[in-house]
Amino acid sequence: MKILLVSSKYQPEYSGSGLRAHNTYKRLTEKYGIDYDVVSNAVNFQGNSTYNYDGVEVYQISFPYKIPLKKSISRYLILLLSIFWEVFYSWVYIRKNIDNYHLLHTFGNTWTIGFLTWYFNKKHKPVIRELCNEMSNPMYPIQFTKTFEKIFRNEKNLVVAISERLGDLAKGFQVKNIWVRPNPIDETKFHIDFSNKFSYRKKLTKFNNDDIVLSLIANFIDRKNQDFALSVLSVLPENYKLILAGPLKPEESVYFEKLSERVITLGLERRVDIRTGFIENFDEYLKCSDVFLFPSKAEGLGTPLLESQACGIPVVSNSIKGISDMVIEDARGGFSLKMDKYDWAEAIKKSMCIDKDTLLENAASIKEFSSSKKIDDEYYKKFLGMING
C-alpha cells in the first residue's frame, strides 16, 4: 500500500490540518507499515523545493513570487500564473509517479489538490478528501464544482468530515461516501496529569499557584478571537490570569499589534502572558491551566475542545452549531454559549466548580470516541476497503 498525501500547507509552515496529517501518517507507518509520499503547497514559502521535515521528505509546489494582498491588476495576473504553476508542476510530478500510488489523501484547498483529485479519479484510483475548515462548498476548486460533485458521488471515493456540521454540508452536495469523525487525539500526550499542574505553570508562565489561569492557544489571527478573551478577562476578578500563545504569521502582525495595544488599554499587562511561535508542548499549556477558552468565530471542528477535556481541563467555547454542541456537555466538560463577556465570565466561574470526578468521567468519554488508536484503526480498514474494492 502506497498513498500520496497532499496538503495545502505542511510543516514548518504551520496549519492545524497539515500538522495532523503529518502526525497521523507517522503513526500509520509505525503501526501498519504504510508507505507514503508528501506533496505540499505553501503561502509563506516561495518556489518549488524538496526538503526533509521530521524524517519525512516533502515536495513543495509553490509559485516563486509572493501573491500581493492588495487588489490590483498585478495581483490577479500573479494569481492566474500561480494557478498554472501549481497545475503544471502537479502534472509533471504525477504523470511519472501515478503507477506508484494506490490512493490519494488530501488536506486543504489548493489547485494542486483539485488537479490531483481529478487525475486520480481519471486513472480510476480512489480519493479521500478531508474537510478541515469552515466552508460553504466542499467541491473545491469551486470553479469546477460540478466536476467534483460527480467524482464524490462515486462511492469508491471518500469525504472525511471532522464535525457533524461539515458532514451535513457534504450531504447537501450528495456526496455518496462520508465518514464523520473528530480529529484524532494523541492519548500519549493528552491525558490527566493533575499532579504536574503547578510545575508546568512555573515552567511556562509568569503566574503562580494562587492564580486562576485561563488559556487560549491558537494562531494569532482575527478568527481565533483573542480580543474577546481579553474583554472577558477585564470583567473577571484580579486573580484571573490569561495565557495567549501560538504561531504568529508575518501577515498577521497588524492584528497582533492591535492585540498588544488592547492589553495596555485595558490595564491587563500583569494579568496576560503572551507567547508567540509554534507551541510544541501544547498539552503542557493545557495541563497548567484551570479553564481553556475557545472564542473562535468559525471552525471546522476545534480539536483543542477535545484535547483540553481529555486532560480534565474544562472549556468555555463559542456556541457553534454542529461543533461545540457535539463535543461539550454543559456542566461536565465546560460550557458552550453565545459571545457575551459577562455570560462568559459566569461560565468560567461555573467551570471552576465542576468536581474532579466529573472531569475524570468526561475525559474518559472524550477519549472513547476520539482516541488516535481508534481512528487510526478505522483509517486502515477504509484504506484496505477502498484499494481492494
Image (cartoon, rainbow, N blue to C red):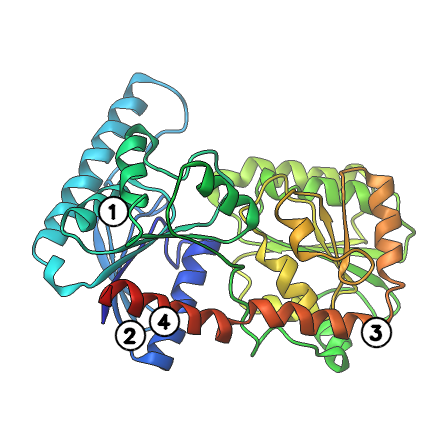
* Residue 18, quarter of picture: bottom left
Q: Which residue is mark 2?
A: 34
Q: Badges 2 and 3: C-beta atoms under 8 Å apart?
A: no
Distance of mark 3 from mark 1, alpha carbons? Answer: 47 Å
- Find disc 3 in the rendering and name its residue: 356
Q: Residue at x 76, y 78 (%)?
A: 194
Residue 174 relative to residue 183: left or right: left
Q: Which residue is mark 4?
A: 380
- Name the amino acid type tagged 4: Tyr
Amino acid under disc 2: Ile
The reply to whether residue 311 is visible in this rendering is no
In the depicted structure, whether residue 81 falls above or below residue 264: above
Q: Amino acid at mark 3?
A: Lys
Relative vertical location of residue 121 with respect to residue 98 in this rendering, above or below: above
Tell me the residue that label 1 is attached to: 117
Q: For the residues carrying marks 3 and 1, which lies nearer the camera in this image?
A: 1
- The first of marks 4 and 2 along the sequence is 2
Instruction: Label 2: state its secondary structure.
Output: loop
Camera-side residue: 302 or 374? 374
> Which x, y percent locates residue 323?
62, 49
Q: Residue furthest right?
A: 237
Residue 134 makes an appearance in the image: yes
In contact (CB < 8 Å): disc 4 and disc 2: yes
Foreground: disc 4 or disc 2: 4
Among the two numbered marks 3 and 1 on one chain, the one whose residue lies closer to the N terminus: 1
Residue at 60% across / 38% down in the picture?
A: 222
Q: Earlier in the sequence, mark 4 or mark 3?
A: 3
Q: Earlier in the sequence, mark 2 or mark 1?
A: 2
Determine crowd level at label 2: few under 14, some 14-19, many 20+ residues with C-alpha closer than 10 A.
some
